[in-house]
Image (cartoon, rainbow, N blue to C red):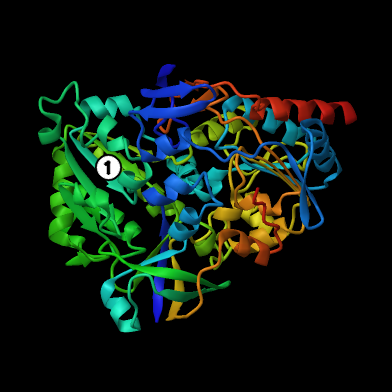
Amino acid sequence: MIVKDAVCPFCGCLCDDIEVEVEGNRVVAVTNACELGMTKFMGEKRMKNPILRDGNRWKDITYDEAIRYAADMLLSAERPLLYGWSGTHGEAQCVGVHMAELIHGVIDNTSSVCHGPSILAIQEVGHPGCTLGVVKNRADLVIYWGSNPIDAHPRHLSRYTRYAEGFFLENAFRDRKVIVVDVRKTETANIADEFIQIKPGGDYAVLSALRAIVQGKVDTIPRTVAGVTRAQLVRVANLCKSAKFGAVYFGLGLTMTQGKYKNIRNAIELISELNRHTKFTISAMRGHYNVYGSNEVNTWMTGYPFGIDFSRGIAFYNPGETTAVDILARKECDAALIVGSDPAAHFPRRCLEHLADIPVVQLDPYPNATTAFCNVQIPVAVTGIDAEGTAYRMDGVPIRTRRVLSTDYLSDEEVLSRMYALMQEAS
Amino acid sequence: MKFLMITGRTVNQGVTVENKTSPEYAAETSTCFMHEFDMMELGLDDGDTVRVTGPCGDVVMRVSASVEVEMGTVFVPYGPYANHIVAAGTRSTGMPDFKSHMVEIEPTDEAPKLVHELMEDLGGLAYDS
């Protein structure tokens, strides 16, 4: 059987034109997906049933036992942390927020170690963004800043920018210029019309220099700024001002470096300056396929996008205090529920040392690095493969992922709903 | 020698990220991409192992020459090896300094550990069935 128009549940592009060939309960071929998406659809080696750590060995347990264990763990914790949420569908994220509120816990998603700083900047100065379709059809200048889509979002270039047709562009490949700004000469830099190589940590200074040039203050710019020549900065500023429609896509090269959210704020303010001359937008290259959705769900339910602390009985938000890395590093939480992410692979070691000391339950289809720190792991269906649900694309467009095969695995939403029902009964 | 360590996504890291118990994931995320002049300076060939020491400890990785990184900088794919030496401070943002750690790099004869060995060093228990 061939399933057409399946939605790829890997990165924030949420490509919705995938063809998946299914034989029995296996995906045997994938068309249109990039290497990342294809590998996800073809993924095997799922965990077969829930497991419990029993001393120095693992024991198989039933779903009922695993769900009961998780509910009891969360109910008896004084400061539970509910972390992850970007690798699951919106319906499951909703249950997670209800659960956090019920037990006065902290709920945080992977954006705190991804585009959390971008959201902090957006809260300060707003977000002049647009959908990917607008960029595809209108943009004659695209800037990738601190992002490397060839490795991280491989089809972004072919569906929306470098290699995409544009309704309002006669010859998109010729008429659309692509600029890459990075500290490394990445593969994406190699296909750009102009590459700006910045010295590490110099993004803020280069953004400030571009703002000054766009304001007509070229004379204030030194000969080089963070390794970039004044001549190149002036050329790029002129390219931006003369574009009919420009779009900046930025990545973790801005959020994880020195300056963090201040880099993004400066980038947004550059876009604000450019909008005095032409039309310009800026958006984040979101990583997980539904990290945007976890920010949306959290925001409409609590008012805040990530790092939400219910310990006061109301939603409280203070990144750096109520975010997962900080809470783990301070050895503050006394239980953790992990859903749709793998903090043991992506958090600093100090956080892992605390995970080893507290009870941990994880919902994940596969054994991963966090499995080693679990007391219980519950294998679940993969959203977009054997579970369906809503995800938000990197531009904020909600897309319903489809189920391409049937298995006996429960979805994240089903497992969490059963856990939540037990917790409601007990409290 | 001291280097600036930058972590980031690679295609191979993304392809193996759902299969973290695989040797391919371990190989990719324990790769330290380095400028070939820096490798000459340290007497390293492609595939040699190095001890990378950061603010929170050290970890063994395998070097690979790369034209993408500048001298004085190394690039390591996101994963448990880089995070073994990354500090947990977030400067009140929630985000650690994943792309701005100074590290010390020296040649070693040790081989990189497997992912589950790193996890067991920190108190975890490997699951492999």
Seen in the picture, residue A25 relative to A267 is either above or below; the reply is above
What chain is tagged by disc 1? Answer: A
**How would you rate the neighbour count of disc 1 (Cα within 10 Å): few for under 14, some for 14-19, many for 20 or more?**
some
Q: Label 1 belongs to which residue?
A: A273
In percent of width and height, residue A90 lies at 58, 27
Closer to the camera in the image, A147 or B93: A147
Q: Position of residue B31 (x, y in %)?
A: 42, 64
Q: Is residue A313 left or right of residue B13?
A: right
Q: Position of residue A252 (x, y in %)?
A: 41, 50
Where A197 sits versus A214, above or below?
A: below
Q: Quadrant of residue A149?
A: top left
Q: Is residue A54 left or right of residue A174?
A: right
Quick check: A182 above or below A106? below
Q: Quadrant of the N terminus of chain A?
A: top left
Front in this rendered view, residue A313 or A162: A162
Q: Element at badge 1?
A: helix
Q: How many marks?
A: 1
Give x and y (percent) for residue A393: 43, 29
Is residue A126 visible in the rendered image? The answer is no
Which residue sits furthest right? A426
Q: Residue at x 58, y 61 (%)?
A: A348
Q: Nearer the viewer, residue A321 or A152?
A: A152
Q: Quadrant of residue A93?
A: top right
Residue type pointed to by label 1: Glu
**Quarter assignment of residue A423:** top right
| Quadrant of the frame with the C terminus of chain A | top right
Residue A28 shows in this picture: yes
Q: Residue at 56% of width from left, 62% of height from top?
A: B114
Q: Residue at x 36, y 34 (%)?
A: A128
